Image: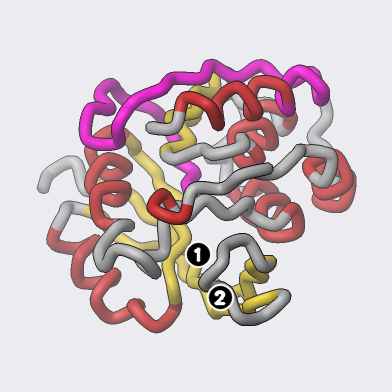
């Protein structure tokens, strides 16, 4: 199967339904289709996707996991602590004929090993450091990790990744648009600068 182009993938991922009643404490935001397709296309070109075992940790409505399946991943599992959200993710996957395993589980309980983790963890707007358990899990189970974090935390995140046994190979910056989702939001759309990291686990660590 030939890979989808980045634009073709973006158009498909736009069909995924988002959260109808997002939970603020879980910082439930859907990864924009443009950003999801960029990450997945880059991972494909780096050889981290096609024929690989993929974990999406904190998968939410499933856009990254579904995209990984559509791009030829061998086996994809999406993990999320919100079981209700996984019902929505399953519906999105069925609509796009994507093969994804959905597992309702807290991030701290995730075990096993995969070739690549692709994740969009909480940015820590409601709970400082909320993204750290996701990095811990990703470096524990993944050989290669793609992870998104606020650019304002770059110095801390770079040090944290190194301390946990990860080696950063690439960092790119994108503008992440968050639509008005919660009562405390003041703007119709909030734009924040987000870093996308590609990380390799140092097995000798």
Magenta stretch in the rendered image: 92-120
- Choose the circle earlier in sequence order: 1 or 2: 2
Front residue of 133/155: it is 133
Crowdedness near tag 2: few (<14), some (14–19) or many (≥20) residues, C-alpha within 10 Å: some
Pointer 1 with pointer 2, Cβ within 8 A: yes
**Image quarter (top left, top right, bottom left or bottom right) of the N terminus:** top right
**Residue 163 shows in the view:** yes
Q: Is mark 2 on a helix, strand or loop?
A: strand
User: Looking at the image, is 154 positioned above or below residue 204?
Assistant: below
Q: Which residue lies furthest to the front in this view?
A: 183
On the image, the x and y values in percent for residue 36 come to: 66, 52
Which of the 4 image quadrants contains residue 92?
top right
- Residue at 81% across, 25% down: 96
Q: CA gap, disc 1 to disc 2?
A: 6 Å
The disc at residue 173 is: 2
**Residue 52 shows in the view:** no
Q: Is 51 situated left or right of 34 in this image?
A: left
Q: What residue sits right under mark 1 in the picture?
A: 196
On the image, the x and y values in percent for residue 131 come to: 32, 57
Front residue of 156/178: it is 178
Tell me if residue 198 is in the magenta stretch: no
Which of the 4 image quadrants contains residue 89?
top right
- Residue at 87% across, 52% down: 7
User: Looking at the image, is 184 positioned above or below residue 71?
Assistant: below
């Amino acid at each position: 199967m030939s890979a989808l182009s980045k634009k073709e993938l973006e158009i498909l991922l736009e069909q995924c339904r988002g959260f109808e009643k997002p939970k603020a404490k879980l910082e439930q935001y859907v990864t924009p289709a443009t950003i999801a397709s960029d990450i997945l296309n880059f991972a494909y070109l780096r050889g981290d996707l096609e024929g690989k075992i993929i974990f999406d940790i904190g998968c939410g409505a499933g856009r990254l996991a579904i995209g990984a399946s559509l791009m030829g991943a061998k086996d994809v599992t999406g993990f999320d602590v919100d079981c209700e959200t996984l019902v929505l993710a399953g519906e999105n996957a069925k609509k796009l004929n994507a093969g994804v395993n959905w597992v309702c589980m807290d991030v701290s309980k995730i075990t096993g090993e995969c070739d690549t983790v692709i994740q969009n963890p909480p940015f820590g707007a409601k709970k400082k450091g909320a993204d750290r358990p996701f990095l811990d899990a990703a470096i524990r189970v993944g050989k290669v990790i793609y992870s998104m974090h606020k650019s304002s935390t770059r110095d801390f995140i770079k040090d944290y990744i190194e301390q946990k046994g990860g080696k950063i190979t690439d960092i790119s910056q994108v503008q992440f648009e968050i639509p008005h989702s919660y009562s405390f939001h003041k703007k119709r759309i909030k734009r924040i600068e987000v870093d996308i990291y590609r990380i390799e686990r140092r097995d000798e660590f």
